[in-house]
Amino acid sequence: MRPLDIVGLAEPEEVEVLEPEEDFEQFLLPVINEMREDIAALTREHGRAYLRNRSKLWEMDNMLIQIKTQVEASEESALNHLQNPGDGVDGRAAKRCEKAEEKAKEIAKMAEMLVELVRRIERSESS
């Protein structure tokens, strides 16, 4: 440690006082410009986030349409097999049809849950 210089402490340092215009230009203006840039960047990011969310919702909507189409096709196939038992449908095929119906019901439930999820997301975005 260095010893304290008592003489140096006794004499206050002179500080240059700036005019208000110089003070504004030298210190405040750069800070204000930086804040404006930050606000612009945040605004751009907010817009991008909104578009990403909308894009995800469109993807979910398309997925729901595909699931619905698959469920309808599975139901139709299972019903066709059940309605035409004379076409060589034996016990194993009947069990497969039952399983297909169960799967179709499960997929329909999943689709309903996804629809409800999308609705909740849309409600939360609109509020």
Image (cartoon, helix red, strand yellow):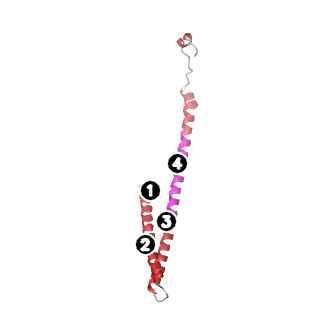
Tag 3: Cα neighbours inside 10 Å, few (<14), some, or many (≥20)?
A: some
Q: Quadrant of residue 34?
A: top right
Label annotation for residue 11: none
Q: Quadrant of the C terminus?
A: bottom left
Label 4 to label 3, Cα distance in Å?
A: 27 Å
Q: Earlier in the sequence, mark 4 or mark 1?
A: 4
Q: Is residue 121 above or below residue 74?
A: above
Count every numbered label the image shows and give the total.
4
User: Residues in magenta?
Assistant: 35-61
User: Residue beneath label 3, please?
Assistant: 61
First-in-chain label (1 vs 3): 3
Q: Nearer the viewer, mark 4 or mark 3?
A: 3
Tell me, yes or no, if residue 7 can be seen here: yes
- Residue plotted at (44% across, 85% down): 83
Q: Nearer the viewer, mark 2 or mark 3?
A: 2
For residue 43, the mark is 4
In the image, residue 111 sits, relative to residue 22, either above or below, namely below
Q: Secondary structure at mark 3?
A: helix
For marks 4 and 3, the one nearer the N-term is 4
Q: In the rendered image, which residue does mark 2 sit on? A: 105
User: Are there few (<14), some (14-19), or many (20+) residues within 10 Å of tag 4?
Assistant: few
Q: Are marks 4 and 1 in contact (CB under 8 Å)?
A: no
Q: Amino acid at mark 3?
A: Asp
Give the SS element for disc 4. helix
